[in-house]
Image (spheres, coloured by chain):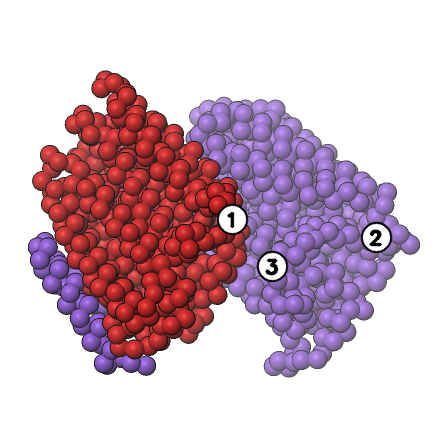
Chain colours: A red, B purple
Amino acid sequence: MDFSNFLAMRHEIILLAITLLLIVAEVFIPQNKKQSIVHLAILLFGLHTIVGFLPIMETNLFGGMFRTNGLIHFFKNILNLGVFILLLQSADWLRAKIFSQNKGTEFFILLFSSLLGMYFMISSGDFLMFYLGLELSTLPVAALAAYETTNRRSSEAGIKLILSSALASGVSLFGISMLYATSGSIYFENIIQIIASTDLTILGMILFFAGLAFKISLVPFHFWTADVYEGAPISVASYLSVISKGAAVFILMILLFTVLKPLMHVWENLIYLVAVLTMFIGNLFALRQQNMKRFLAFSSIAQAGFILLGLIAGTQLGTATIVYFVLIYVFSNLAAFGVVQAISLETGKEDINDYEGLYRTNPNLSLVMMLALFSLAGIPPVAGFFGKFFLFTAAASEGYYLLVFIAVVNVTISLYYYLIVVRAMFLRKSDNPIPFFKNRIYMRLGLLITVIGILVLGLYSPLYDYIYELSGIFN
Amino acid sequence: MNFSSIILIPLIPLAVFLLLGIFNKKIKPLASGYIGVAGLLVSTLLSINTAYHYFFVYGKSDGVYQTFVEKTVWMNFTDTLAIDMGVQIDPISVMMLIVVSIVSLMVQIYSRGYMKGDDGYTKFFAFLALFSFSMYGLVLATNLFQIYIFWELVGVSSYLLIGYYYTKPSAVSAAKKAFIVTRFADLGFLIGILIMGYYTGTYDFETLNNPEGSAILNWASTSFMGLSVLTWALILIFIGGAGKSAMFPLHIWLPDAMEGPTPVSALIHAATMVVAGIFLVARLFPMFYFVEEGFALNIVAYVGAFSSLFAAIIAITQTDIKRVLAFSTMSQLGYMMLALGVSGYEGHEGLGYMASMFHLFTHAMFKALLFLCAGSVIHAVHSNYLKDMGGLRKYMPITNITFLIAALAIAGVPPFAGFFSKDEILVAAFEHNKLIYFIGIFVAGLTAFYMFRIYFGIFWGKDTKYEQKPHESPLSMTFPLLFLALLSIIGGFIPFSEFVTADKAGFEAHINYPLAAVAVGVGLIGIALAWVFYKKENDLADKMVNFFGPLYQWTYDKFYFDEIYLFITKKILFNRVSAPIAKFDRKYVDGTMVGIGNKTVLASEKIKGMQSGKVQDYAFAFVAGVVIIALVFIYLWTS
């Protein structure tokens, strides 16, 4: 056997090695120096992120259970980048709150396990691998959501997440079993040739779709989102909203565009319906939120609705715009969560009202937040504008003008609530503003990367062309 | 042909502007003055270098000055129509480089003294640099669109500088007025540009102006309301030029613009920006001349002549010395316009064109000098009004002499610069249109009179008692005065007709002695009258005022043009047109939008309760969602 093929699993192998190394380090590093594990983890993961950008060969392993190609590879890099930023933003929180309870290392181990699950999920070549990846990516996050054991809401979030996701996984698995029943195979390559549009396959697809829709927080499978985001530690909420959602969107896209392509006449309507529901419900709920985390939860639901516009286009253009949008979304949302994290850690304040007058006391943080919100809202010239613009173009090019119109209406609604936060920070005065504070180096670095991402992706387009080329493989 | 050094001429002021603008607070005022002057000095040297090489080294071939163009495509409209950005070097652009450079440099040096101690010192120099950049860009433009872009930039700098004392309400409203009036004119300009581009397929001056080119040969192809569309385009473009150059009836902004600091008035509202309109007509001169046998050019001539007369009459009665100078500027700009209007194209026929450019050049020098002298006086007595001045010759000898030189120049007394350029204008007018010639000669007399009226009023006349003894201005202010005075003396001896002509070929111009004698005679009569009225304190002037009575009052109130405009805009436009539209907009357009917004928020409030917080409810919703979707897509929505 030629072991060089295993290099195609470089991401998975390295991440597993890092995880195991941290377990060992946990044992050997003395109690009073435990905090240095944060540096170690960030360093190792940073290297992993950089190494990840080296090119990889296209290949199938284990009889087609595991596969990789340029686009999957690129997407894993996006996830890595997101997790790296997230680690930088969480470092201070971990040192201040978690290591004091002597359970810091497990955070990394759980987080990396979940990421490993996502790697396997998006690289899966059959439903078994897919399901394993899905479960591996979900279960550790439930533990992470309950990580602040002293906080009752955190425990509640953990319970809600594990219960809801158990239901979702069950439904999804039921759907997969129906697809297996009709096609007689769990391999994507085989299913694609056999699958036919019968009632049973359609039901199977809908059930399977529900499971992933749960992870992406599409309406009506979204109810857990706000409660979990609010209760869970901010790092975990931002992981759920960015990394977990991004990976699920990606695998959903791959499966819809390849395996379930013969059912396109069904799922394009399904996506249409869910997209409209998701955009409206997400935006309408976001409109009246007071808590920043709940606010961002609903905003991220609405953003997922926009992503569906790319899915419905179902072409190379659709693929490229989705990947590009997710990349921008990673930067924008992490920037917003990063600022919330920094302020929450420093002052414990998480309400929109608390942000009043922030510009006077912390101009830099407010500017980062403003950029992030502008990018989420899609205001040129920041990156988010182009992300949305390309998505809408993709949908319009397939003739979904009404849907694009609905999306534009929703962008207008979303602009309103994003600007509420901007107004609070810049225009409102407060008797009791958040006092000035200085962030530590990791947090500043984490925010800096997101700001660079938001600005550069807005002004520099060749990356999109690169993604567009990579996206050719699915058509 | 070294374009890389020419492109630096506008870019250096731009760099200065960015530097001073971005590091506004961090740069010491003293340093910002030096940075501004140094930047402009480099630009000036480069301009002089360019001029020298163009006129004397490589510019001429076969006795004709060539046009050099270097450009890149900036924006493609269609396959054939594109907007370029570039640099065009030909006699008038090189001449304008010199004018803009010298006046800007002198004004910047002068401002170092004049603006000393002002809070916005750095900001002031930043704005000046922005203006220089825009003006250079304007004169170097290769096409109509580029000139329009810089045209607007010049307008913005003018706006910023008029409103420089932004705590003064009068300055703010003057800035707004200048901006709105010129913007209104620029609307005409823009429409003209678009028509031009649509019918000729190009914006390039080179292509448009080619007498054998398709634009000029095919002018008659399309007509609209009895005139060729190209004539319409030229008239519209001229409206833009008339706005910038304060031609009647778009002149109302210029007197108010005197609210800006005096160096700004000298630079922008006397020497450079206001001649942009003249420059524009000169730039498109072949089109004006050839299209429809010069119909649009006739309009230019009459508008110019009328403005010239109109402004000169008003100037006689004004008591604010800067306003006298402002109306004088308007009058002289009218002179330049009428000269262009009576000009032919080839050889000696093109005398008017050459005279106009010549007068633009000399006028820039002596009018800037007049303004700077006025600034020096205002600096000393802290007032703009004639009544607060008098007998200053004893206290301010340099200002006195230089003002006198400039006044003699503008009055057309030989051998000062104005004599030569004005003489050429009158000759050109005499040869082409007697009516305009007589207007011109009458205005020459008026000019001499009102200019010496304020000269005697300031430096002679009554011996005003001053609270603080006025004193001569510092060297940074007197040096530009002396330098410009020198140019006002020798500027007339430049053989302009060799360099700047309509067909670029150059001819020999001679002084027409009988006409010159008449012009000088009229000028001297004007001076003599002023001498009688104002040299010593006497009541002759008051008697004249009483004699003319209401006529004087009309003139003093500028023939109520401001009031007419206010009536039209406020009473008619605002009340009868804008107010109903605004009401409709608020009530129905906004009302609908606000209604939708309120309904959205209300909906949001109503559905908030759906999120119960109970995980069993969520599970129910999940399963219900799956079931409903499955039912819908299996049984109902099966396409």
Tell which of A27 and B458 is nearer to you.
Answer: A27
> Mark 1 vs mark 3: same chain?
no
Tell which of A222 and B453 is nearer to you.
Answer: A222
- What residue is drawn where x is 10% and y is 55%? B615
Question: Disc 3 sits on a residue from what chain?
Answer: B
| Amino acid type assigned to the residue bearing label 2 in the image | Tyr
Q: Choose mark 2 or mark 3, whichever is in front.
A: 3
Q: Earlier in the sequence, mark 2 or mark 3?
A: 2
Residue A127's spot in the image, x, y percent? Answer: 32, 59
Q: CA distance from mark 1 to mark 2?
A: 66 Å
Q: Is A46 above or below relative to A458?
A: above
Q: CA distance from mark 2 to mark 3?
A: 30 Å
Q: What is the quadrant of residue B536 in the picture?
A: top right
Mark 2 = which residue? B65
Residue B515's spot in the image, x, y percent? Answer: 80, 55
Mark 3 = which residue? B75
- What residue is drawn where x is 52% and y is 53%? A466
Q: Secondary structure at mark 3?
A: strand
Mark 1 = which residue? A57
Q: Choose mark 1 or mark 2, whichever is in front.
A: 1
What crowding class fits label 3: few (fewer than 14 Cα within 10 Å), some (14-19), or many (20 or more)?
few
- What residue is drawn where x is 45% and y is 49%? A74
Q: Choose mark 1 or mark 3, whichever is in front.
A: 1
> Mark 1 vs mark 2: same chain?
no
Residue A33's spot in the image, x, y percent? Answer: 26, 19
- What residue is drawn where x is 31% and y is 47%? A117
Question: Disc 1 sits on a residue from what chain?
Answer: A
| Amino acid type assigned to the residue bearing label 1 in the image | Met
- Residue at the far front: name it: A1
